[in-house]
Amino acid sequence: MSIATPSQTVGPFFGVGLGRVDAGGTMRVEGQVLDGAGEPVPDALLEVVQGVELGRVRTDEEGAFAFTVSPASFLSLTVFARGLLRHLNTRMYFPGVEDEVLASIDPGRRGTLIARREGEVLRFDIRLQGPGETVFFE
Amino acid sequence: MPTELDFEPPYLFPDYRATRLRAPRHEPVRLPDEWFHHTRGPAFGRIPIRPEDADLTRQHAGEPLGQRIILSGRVTDSDGRPVRGTLVEVWQANAAGRYVDPADDHPAPLDPNFTGAGRCLTDDEGRYRFVTVKPGAYPWRNHENAWRPAHVHFSLFGPSLSSRLVTQMYFPGDPLIPIDPILGSIADPRGRDLLISRFDLETTVPEWALGYTWDVVLRGRNATPMEP
């Protein structure tokens, strides 16, 4: 078997190469990416995969992001950033959804995978490290 | 499934300062293969790909300054099978070591004839090819007098969610390679070598451009079952 090519960080200057892509859908998801000190991560790139649709969005100076998707049970999310030597995979579950993957997660951490409804939008924050650290998958 | 030998860097590598507050402390949760590894990756229909996107020297009125190079290679899966029709995206600094990105404040000149971004799809043999200029090294503030070796950023999708790869390709003989904490985060020298392209006289075009070759292996196997 051939050895997989190792990963390296996306770095801070990915904007020119990896621009915004709209995944379609009309449901708005908003959130923030935070580091281990609770500070916003202003240079993260998120990819949203829903079926074969790909969305791509970067965080702003407040670490905030927003994208739209179609309603589903969950979204696959990939996080890239300066300081992440490998990307992180996670899922955002829509409120009220249950499945085997969610059920297999430590109940104390499960909530980090579930979006909350705030009026017309879904809120989903990603904590890379520390209290409330998001569950990441491999 | 046999364990694949891999040379992935750790999440936490304190010599690369930005990992300290961004590396998760929990180990990632390993999902059963059928829930994740065989989940089909995304289509990229919404990312426009034009033939001229693979030539970074022809995106403006004039030609960029710097050493013209042809960067090519083959993308395969762990079984050596070509990964066809997958999106390859690249971005890089110009020959002076400056990115177009507004956040790059390195006082080296921008080149009005160079943006530094390209994309293409791999062909039926899994091959990709870009024409560009060799990027310059540039300083960063990770530690005293820190400089990144010249590199080109690569992003590839492959057939499933688990084959997604974002990495950096380096140039052979670069004196900054042995002291770079980002490449150095890969502990095994065999792993670091996988990210260094080789000069290739075969793909060098006489009187025009130097050839560098770099092959990529994406994680996992194609969905087709193994022959007995």
Image (tube, rainbow, N blue to C red):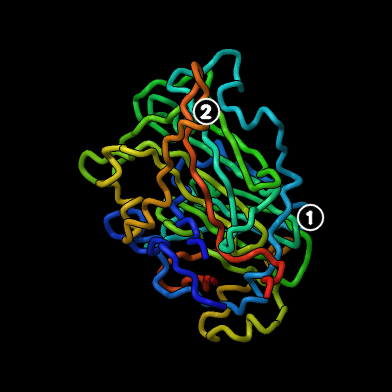
SS state under label 1: loop
SS state under label 2: strand
Residue A119 numbered mark, or none = none
Q: Where is the C terminus of chain B found, in terms of image quarters?
A: bottom right
Q: Is residue A124 visible?
A: no
Q: Nearer the viewer, residue A53 or B57?
A: B57
Residue A137: image x %, image y %? Answer: 54, 72
The disc numbered 1 marks a residue on which chain? A
Q: Which residue is mark 2?
A: B132
Q: Is residue B55 visible?
A: yes
Q: Nearer the viewer, residue A128 or B214?
A: B214
Residue B130 higher or lower than B27, as above or below: above
Horizontal placement of B64 versus B129: left or right? left
What is the number of callouts on the image? 2
Q: Residues within 10 Å of mark 2 (few under 14, many from 20)?
A: many
Q: Which residue is mark 1?
A: A26
Residue A22: image x %, image y %? Answer: 71, 48
CA–CA distance in space, label 1 to label 2: 39 Å
Please tell me whether mark 1 or mark 2 is closer to you in this view: 2
Q: Where is the N terminus of chain B found, in terms of image quarters?
A: bottom right
Q: Residue at x 56, y 83 (%)?
A: A105
Q: Nearer the viewer, residue B61 or A128?
A: B61
The disc numbered 2 marks a residue on which chain? B
User: What amino acid is at disc 1?
Assistant: Thr
Horizontal placement of A116 versus A9: left or right? right
Q: Residue at x 70, y 48 (%)?
A: B85
Residue B161: image x %, image y %? Answer: 63, 63
